Amino acid sequence: MKSGTVAVIGRANAGKSTLINVLVGEKVSIVSPKPQTTRDRILGILTEKDYQIVFADTPGLYKADGALNRFMQRTADGTAKEVDLILFVIDGHAGLKSEDLAILKGYADRFKNIVAVMTKTDIMPDSEIPMELVKFSEIGVDVVPVSARKGKNLKELIKVILAKLPEGEKLFTQDIISDRSERFMISEIMREKILLKFDKEIPHGVAILVNEFKKRPTGNLYDISIDIVCEKPAHKAILIGKQGSAIREVSSFAREDMEKFLSAKVFLTTYVKVKEDWRNSESLLREYGYSQKDYE
């Protein structure tokens, strides 16, 4: 059987997480229209009778200063060095920019096993797709146009991936779809809802700490306690909202998704705390789980 690892890499908002979620058939990565939604490497595992593909979702390639962003970029680059194949994802709807080609060429020069994926073709005029595909010719890599949202051309993408993966045994058992714990996924659900509700800088300055994650001995019920850490007192006020309205709303949305994910009722308690400039503190990044020696 075919079995291998595939790094999914690209600029912020290219559609990497959505593509993996659709291919795996389960939500393993949170999704929002904002840059820096994915902060760490998350594995999504697609297992069929005659193959297993382990997709590694990575942070978007994004130019910004700060320790957190450096960690994110090290994660993306480090993952590329470890896998059997790289899928370089480009937002087709936004058009293939010179920056995209330059980054793709850089990866193609360093890594020989690479496939370009042009996403969001469902919202592109059909006449534009061939013109965009021609632009890839100078790089000399295979390119597959897809629409994850519409399921367009995904079978062809799988065929292309399998042709480039080695023969081997399964890396994970049949029932595993992600390497991440339930506790981690709960924190990501909370962060996703904050990304979707709040604008501009606030969501990117938020870290989520799960203090309690415990199933009660009787009844199908989890007690979950979460700290939402932000960078400024003014951000805390916005996150809480007038008389607590904002935090109640975002917590309610998060709890609904947590219950679906856990197939259980959730008693959720949230607290908002301030840790100024935590994104530039190496010690706080380690405390919040954003520092990996493998990528330093």
Image (cartoon, helix red, strand yellow):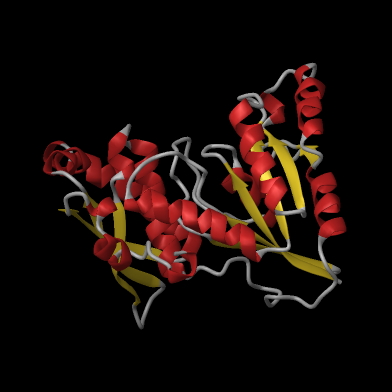
Using the image as rendered, state which of residue 268 and residue 294 is in the foreground.
Answer: 294
46 relative position to 48: left or right: left
Q: Quadrant of the N terminus?
A: bottom right
- Residue 62 vs 284, above or below: the answer is above
Q: Does residue 292 appear in this view? A: yes
Name which residue lies at 36% across and 81% down.
218
Name which quarter of the figure residue 145 lies in.
Answer: top right
Point out the residue furthest to the front here. 109
Name which quarter of the figure residue 50 lies in.
Answer: bottom right
Point out the residue furthest to the bottom here. 217
Q: Quadrant of the C terminus?
A: bottom left
The picture places residue 247, in percent across and down from the top left corner, at: 23, 45
Q: Does residue 47 appear in this view? A: no
Name which residue lies at 61% across and 39% down.
103
The picture places residue 155, in percent across and down from the top left corner, at: 83, 47
76 relative position to 291: left or right: right
The picture places residue 132, in percent across and down from the top left corner, at: 75, 24
Using the image as rendered, state which of residue 274 and residue 216 is in the foreground.
Answer: 274
The picture places residue 105, in percent across and down from the top left corner, at: 69, 40
- Residue 56 vs 108, above or below: the answer is below
Name which residue lies at 61% across and 48% down.
9
Using the image as rendered, state which of residue 218 and residue 77 is in the foreground.
Answer: 77
Name which quarter of the figure residue 34 lies in.
Answer: top left
